[in-house]
Image: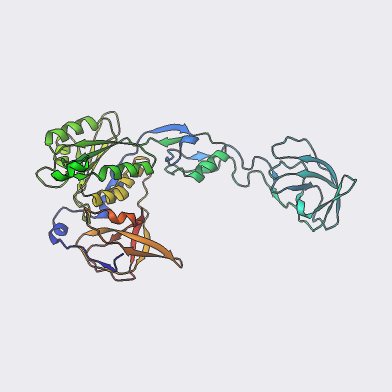
Amino acid sequence: MNQAIALDNHSACGSEPGLITVDEALQLILDRTQALTTECIGLDQALNRYLATPISSQINLPLFSQSAVDGYALCHEGEIEAGVHFELIGEIRAGQRSELVLQQGQAVRLFTGAKIPVHTTTVARQEIVQAIEHQNMIKITAALQPHADIRDVGEEVAVGQCLGQAGQQLSVGAIASLSMAGVQTVHVYALPKVAVVITGDEIADTMDELQSGKIFDANGPLIRAWFQQQHQQVYIFHVTDTEYAVSQLFHDLKDRYDVILTTGGVSVGDYDFVRPVALNIGFKEIFWKVKQKPGKPMFFAEYARKQHSPCYLLGLPGNPAAVYVGIQVYVNLLMKALQGQKSPCAWFSGIIQHELKSDQRERFLRMYAQFEQGQLYLNSLSKQQSHMLSNLMQANCLVRIPANQNIQKGAVLSGIFI
């Protein structure tokens, strides 16, 4: 880890006209993205999906008044003093149907979750109950208040109570909660169908090809792995840096995919065809170029389809660090917006452990964060250049560094865990 980190200042890169801020770019994605259609699926297939409609409980939880412990259902008016005897008239296990009805001075043996019999006034846990040998009698060995250890019908969830809001992501805990309430199917937003386009002629498939100036592809595996982490499939295409090849591919993809995610080809070089080709075939630009580092020449556009929601094109620069930032921040937000989740990014706050020099662009730095005595402390990692990824072996967060500010040790910065 570095005690300080200084990146090259390229004043022209930060001062050129037309750049929008990171927050403006994020808000445009939220504002301009339409949610996809919905579908009904089984709860067992719904992990990490987003609810399209609220869910209300059709039952009470508990369904019936039940025992919270292994013990005895008792019928007795008021507080029970130690030494009181009760007649034992039966036993009820969890899940067992019983027609037993208690009268004053009677008891029934119960197990946790068992339905309490009619006229039960309290439950005595088995630790304070003594059986009287050779008699169907028990003795209470400690004072007991009315209504002890009884789970009342509907005390957790009542019929009609909202269990989940539209836009809510279904976590492991949410799946368990809905299952307990008897929910078997849910209406969720459809998963976006995503095409990933890796542009460029420089990708090597073998070690031998490295001798001819090619490089191994990090962007394709990076993007595929990120989507695997989201439990979502993507389709990866490689295209050469020719206007014809890019145009043919975009024509084919725009009507079959909800998102076209590209890497490379979005700047102003002689072989950067993503933006001009997209505009030529009918995509409408939402923004191009963000005042950030890495990832300035990011491009976001939409294509209106007649019988479907728009196809969105998010063009990321080709440098792998820019792709990594784009995936973690912008693609993540876009995927959620397509599934009805329009909440802004949730940034954490942490304390930087060293100074940082200013830059005219807002920066996303890969850092290592750790909690110490209730505080989150941040440390920058070396090798932050946009073509480098090796520090991702140690990084666990991306931290936002405001533009045009010298950051002092102890400053509070925002970021996201990765």
Position in image of residue 251 (x %, y %): 19, 31
Query: Position of 183 compared to 269: left or right?
Result: right
Residue 7 figure quarter: bottom left
Query: Position of 141 compared to 404: left or right?
Result: right
Above or below, 181 relative to 296: above
Residue 264 visible in the displayed image: no
Q: Residue furthest toward the top?
A: 307
Position in image of residue 142 (x %, y %): 80, 58
Q: Residue furthest toward the front?
A: 208
Position in image of residue 152 (x %, y %): 67, 46
Query: Position of 182 compared to 281: left or right?
Result: right
Using the image as rendered, state which of residue 291 and residue 173 is in the foreground: 173
* Residue at 72% from the left image edge and 44% from the top image edge: 111
Residue 5 figure quarter: bottom left
* Residue at 34% from the left image edge and 43% from the top image edge: 225
Q: Residue furthest toward the bottom?
A: 409
* Residue at 37% from the left image edge and 64% from the top image edge: 350
Using the image as rendered, state which of residue 78 and residue 72 is in the foreground: 72
Residue 112 visible in the displayed image: yes
Position in image of residue 395 (x %, y %): 34, 57
Above or below, 266 relative to 128: above
* Residue at 78% from the left image edge and 55% from the top image edge: 128
Above or below, 352 relative to 262: below
Q: Quadrant of the N terminus?
A: bottom left
Q: Residue furthest toward the right?
A: 134
Query: Position of 112 compared to 214: left or right?
Result: right
Colour approach in the figure: rainbow
